[in-house]
Image: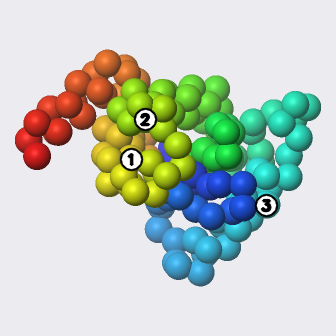
């Protein structure tokens, strides 16, 4: 199960956060800072994209200046979540046309819409890029 999802830039500003487990506001701030410190300090060439974090594991991937981080249970398949991160970025690229940090800031509602189409209650629900994009197109037509 996914505990939380964070997308942060190199400076540690959180551009997207989705919590699937209950945390207080202080705990959330502490977790965001700890995750950024842990992920940003790692060597991208010589270390893996998986980090033990408290009683969980953080799976992350860096795209340009953004870190996409999923905190998962230790017994979950890390590679499946690494692929889910890549699928999320691919769908955002297709939906926004070469997504950047500003798209996440100014079109946050669409980013959450993409995330909600992929993940439900902390579990991956859809892994087909074409199905996700089709649903998003249907939702756009309703607006």
Q: Which mark is residue 92?
A: 2
Query: Disc 3 on helix, strand or loop?
Result: helix
Residue ID at (85%, 46%): 42
Residue ID at (48%, 27%): 90
Compared across the picture, whether 8 is left or right of 129 comes to: right
Q: Which mark is residue 111?
A: 1
User: From the viewer's perspective, is the residue at label 2 or at label 3 nearer?
Assistant: 2
Pointer 3 local density, CA inside 10 Å: few below 14, some 14–19, many at least 20: some
Considering only vertical position in the picture, is 15 above or below 101?
Answer: below
Estimate the spatial distance between the alpha carbons at disc 2 and disc 3, rounded to whole Å.
25 Å
The numbered mark, 2 or 3, whose residue comes first in the sequence reads 3
Q: Which mark is residue 37?
A: 3
**Horizontal and vertical percent for residue 28?**
58, 71
Pointer 1 local density, CA inside 10 Å: few below 14, some 14–19, many at least 20: many
Residue ID at (65%, 37%): 63
Considering only vertical position in the picture, is 118 above or below 2?
Answer: above
Using the rendered image of the protein, determine whether residue 77 is visible from the camera's viewpoint: no
Residue ID at (29%, 27%): 133
Considering only vertical position in the picture, is 99 above or below 24?
Answer: above
**Horizontal and vertical percent for residue 121?**
37, 49
Query: Disc 2 on helix, strand or loop?
Result: helix
Compared across the picture, whether 124 is left or right of 28 comes to: left
Compared across the picture, whether 15 is left or right of 63 comes to: left
Q: Quadrant of residue 140?
A: top left
The front one of 113 and 53 is: 113
Query: Disc 1 on helix, strand or loop?
Result: helix
Estimate the spatial distance between the alpha carbons at disc 3 and disc 1, rounded to whole Å.
24 Å
Pointer 2 local density, CA inside 10 Å: few below 14, some 14–19, many at least 20: many
The front one of 55 and 29 is: 29
Using the rendered image of the protein, determine whether residue 134 is visible from the camera's viewpoint: yes
Estimate the spatial distance between the alpha carbons at disc 2 and disc 1, rounded to whole Å.
7 Å
The numbered mark, 2 or 1, whose residue comes first in the sequence reads 2
């Amino acid at each position: 199960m996914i505990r939380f999802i964070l997308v942060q830039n190199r400076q540690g500003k959180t551009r997207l956060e989705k919590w699937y487990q209950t945390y207080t506001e202080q705990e959330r701030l502490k977790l965001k800072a700890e995750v950024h410190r842990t992920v940003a300090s790692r060597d991208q060439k010589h270390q893996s994209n998986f980090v033990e974090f408290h009683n969980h594991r953080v799976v992350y991937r860096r795209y340009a200046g953004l870190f996409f981080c999923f905190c998962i249970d230790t017994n979950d398949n890390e590679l499946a979540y690494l692929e889910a991160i890549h699928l999320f970025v691919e769908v955002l690229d297709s939906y926004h046309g070469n997504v950047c940090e500003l798209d996440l800031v100014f079109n946050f509602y669409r980013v959450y819409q993409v995330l909600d189409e992929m993940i439900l209650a902390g579990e991956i629900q859809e892994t087909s890029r074409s199905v996700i994009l089709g649903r998003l197109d249907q939702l756009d037509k309703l607006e």
